[in-house]
Image (tube, rainbow, N blue to C red):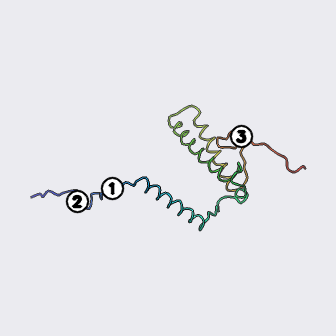
Amino acid sequence: MARAVNIESDKTLPKKRKTRKPMSAEQKKAAGERLAIAREKRLAANPPEYKSIHPDVLARGDEDAWSHINVKKWIKTQKELLSVARSDLRRKVKGAEAQVSSISGYIRNLENYLRSGIYTDLFWGEQGQNRCKTVCLVME
């Protein structure tokens, strides 16, 4: 005599989540202000140490073109371009393989600059649009 077994018991079913009560515009604004104050307080108490960034790079001001903030922005932009180039590579678009290697090399050079303070690429900028100039500092 076979007995029917209920496969879905209370333990196998996912828990039902309560829907959140929607916030009014005033409540959202107040919550945003509270979060901003809490973030400022946390930042003042625990400032970032930037252990992985070279001190020479950190010494540059935030307005400098080569500041760590700008270089991180360049890296983020290039990583977005890299994901597009990789999808082109999967679709076998002509020239995509060269583009992927070029972008990944540029990202690697930017990250190396943040770590060591020495920039080794010929181009710089968010899109790599500017060319580096060589300057002789010491005459031999």
Q: Which residue, as the protein is rendered here, is positioned at the far bottom?
A: 45
Quarter of the figure with residue 13: bottom left
* Residue 71 versus residue 127 in the image, above or below: below
Quarter of image, res 54: bottom right
Left/right placement of residue 101 relative to residue 132 reads left
Name which residue lies at 27% across and 59% down: 12
Q: Label 2 crowding class (10 Å Cα cut-off): few <14, some 14-19, many 20+? A: few
Depth-wise, is mark 3 or mark 2 nearer the camera?
3
Front residue (pair 58, 109): 58
Give the structural element (helix, strand or loop) at label 3.
Answer: strand
Residue occupied by mark 1:
19
Report, in whole angstroms, how far the alpha carbon at label 3 lies from the one at label 2. Answer: 64 Å
Where is residue 106 shown, x and y percent of the image?
A: 65, 45
17 in relation to 46, above or below = above
- Is label 2 or label 1 in front? 1
**Residue 78 located left or right of residue 116:** left
Q: Of callouts 3 and 1, which one flags the residue occurring earlier in the amino acid sequence? A: 1
Hey, what amino acid is under mark 3? Asn
Q: Which one is closest to the eye, mark 3 or mark 1?
A: 1
The residue beneath circle 2 is 9
What amino acid is found at the position of numbered circle 2 in the picture? Ser
Q: Give the image quarter of residue 47.
A: bottom right
Residue annotated with mark 3: 130
| Disc 3: CA contacts within 10 A as few (<14), some (14-19) or many (>=20) | few
Q: Residue at x 72, y 49 (%)?
A: 119
